[in-house]
Image: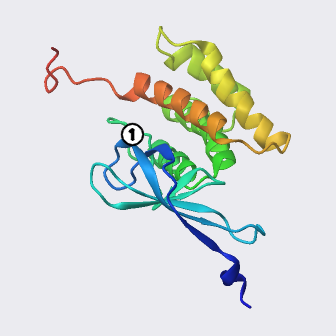
């Protein structure tokens, strides 16, 4: 008997889940249509949903809390310079979307170094100096210096203490990174943007 024969398929039981549709990018609240599970733990468990907006199927891997196809709930940031900062931010989002949360957190830390160097810091500085450079030369007045330190410390814990990040930590670090990036690069052009 093949191990696939041990995979159980169940029709939806009325349970609901909040998730983001990877097709239309909307947050939806949808009912489970089918559940694939394995009592022996040989295969990951999945749920299948239908998007309530675009009606396309969404596969949700329960253990990783991620959808297939992978979607990203973090937006593109207008005004990011072409090059390393934009590429690292894309890596952060891509890693998160496939459940690679530790990678996302450590890349958020790396992003700080790229931001500092792009803003004029020497490329051979130690990491703490990059954070200090951003604080002194780049940080918008409304921003808390503690935010940068939280990104740095979370990345350090993953890198140096071999901690595996979870989805919540990764989400928090990406949100903080987005705030830093938007405050530095997403500045409206007064000629093209109309204030309401």
Residue found at the far bottom of this picture: 1
For image coordinates 38% across by 42% down, the residue present is 28
Asked whether the viewer can see residue 120, the reply is no
Left or right of 166? Residue 136 is left
58, above or below 83, in the image:
below
Residue 71, horizontal then vertical, whole percent = 44, 52
Residue farthest along the right direction in this orientation: 161
Q: Regarding mark 1 in the picture, which secondary structure is present there? A: loop
Tell me which residue sits at (26%, 23%) in the image: 188
- Image coloring type: rainbow
Q: Quadrant of residue 106?
A: top right
* Front residue of this view, candidates 100 and 29: 29
Looking at the rendered image, the quarter that the C terminus falls into is: top left
Instruction: Name the residue carrying label 1.
Output: 75
On the image, the x and y values in percent for residue 91 come to 53, 51
Q: Position of residue 13 (x, y in %)?
A: 52, 54
Viewer-side residue, 15 vs 150: 15
Near mark 1 (Cα within 10 A), the count class, few <14, some 14-19 or many ≥20, is few
């Amino acid at each position: 008997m093949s191990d696939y024969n041990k995979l159980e398929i169940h029709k939806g039981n009325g349970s609901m889940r909040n998730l983001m549709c990877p097709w239309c990018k909307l947050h939806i609240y949808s009912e489970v249509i089918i559940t694939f599970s394995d009592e022996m733990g040989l295969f990951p468990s999945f749920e299948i949903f239908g998007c309530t907006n675009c009606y396309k199927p969404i596969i949700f891997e329960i253990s990783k809390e991620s959808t297939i196809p992978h979607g990203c709930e973090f937006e593109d940031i207008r005004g990011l310079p072409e090059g390393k900062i934009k590429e690292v931010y894309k890596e952060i989002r891509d890693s998160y979307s496939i459940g690679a949360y530790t990678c996302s957190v450590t890349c958020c830390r790396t992003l700080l170094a790229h931001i500092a160097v792009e803003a004029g810091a020497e490329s051979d500085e130690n990491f703490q100096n990059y954070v200090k450079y951003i604080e002194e030369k780049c940080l918008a007045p409304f921003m808390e210096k503690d935010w940068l330190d939280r990104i740095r410390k979370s990345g350090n814990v993953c890198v140096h203490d071999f901690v595996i990040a979870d989805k919540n930590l990764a989400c928090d670090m990406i949100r903080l990174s987005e705030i830093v990036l938007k405050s530095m690069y997403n500045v409206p052009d007064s000629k093209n943007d109309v204030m309401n």
